[in-house]
Image: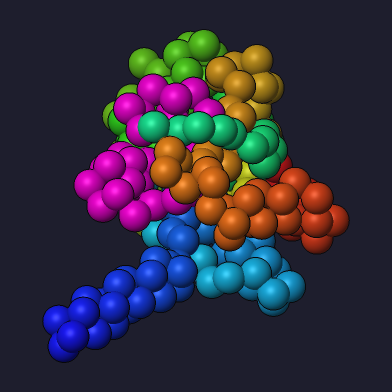
Amino acid sequence: MRHFIILSLMLSLSQSLAFAETLTLAAGAGYKRPVTEIIRAYESSGGAKIDQIYGNMGQVTMQAKGSGTVAFVVGEENFLKSSGLPFVSFQSLGEGILVIAFGKGVKLGGQEDLLTSNVTKIALPDERRAIYGKAAKEFLRKTGLMDKLEKKLLVVATVPQVSAYLISGEVEAGFINLTDAVYIKDRIGGYLTPEKTMYSPIRIVLGVLKGYEDKADTKKFVDFVNTNPGVKAIIEKAGM
């Protein structure tokens, strides 16, 4: 009888823990601000708590593969599809837009101004870890600027690192996404928006990983992202 009671308590505890399981969302660091706002709005509306992980996309996918506890990943669709992660669905969030940002005291009238002596360092994210690094390299190659600017380029891990360097004045210019540029616009000199034909389309999505698709809280969050007008406002404000 005693063993039966202990077993019953263990099963009850296990079921309670499973029921109380907190979902985790992992995202590229360049989307931390809007994703955090969306999750905050969801939780404020009565949705269950969602834990958050941010980093470069290499870190994000490794975390998702290694932990087995990540339910959602926000990132570029083609990158996620080729990551080896078992996604069951993707929900479109918006379009990623590459910009050339410049620091305070710097003025760029066009992309050719990157060639001037006033610009000595240009930061960009690592193309192996961040989609905007890849887009920046595509832009530089297609415009013929790569060879001319190669000695000025400073490769860092993430979009927010580029933004931090711009804000601190460690670089005069940098390639980031419009989302980050919108949030730091008062702390930098400004930004240029290159032609979208100069780099591959960047489709930002919310991916749901296998094993989580049937959970009630997963469905509730995806439905919130799909239908809540506040989410659309957050995405538009973030330049997506």
Q: Report the residue at 52% width, 39% height from top.
A: 207
Q: Is residue 174 above or below residue 25?
A: above
Quarter of the rendering occupied by the N terminus = bottom left
User: Which residue occupies 33% across, 41% down?
Assistant: 61
User: Which span is picked out in magenta?
Assistant: 57-85
Residue at far bottom of view: 2
- Quadrant of image for the C terminus: top right
- As drawn, the residue found furthest toward the left would be 3
Q: Is residue 190 visible?
A: no
Residue in the picture at 30% in, 72% down: 11
In-image side of 202 versus 157 (left or right): right
Locate residue 71, reporting x and y percent. Answer: 45, 50
Give the residue displayed 39% in from the left and 52% down from the top. 70
Camera-side residue of 230 and 192: 230
Q: Nearer the viewer, residue 144 or 42?
A: 42
In the picture provided, is 237 more to the left or to the right than 103? right
Color style of the picture: rainbow
**Does residue 67 belong to the magenta stretch?**
yes
> What percent of the width, then of the height, locates residue 51?
45, 66
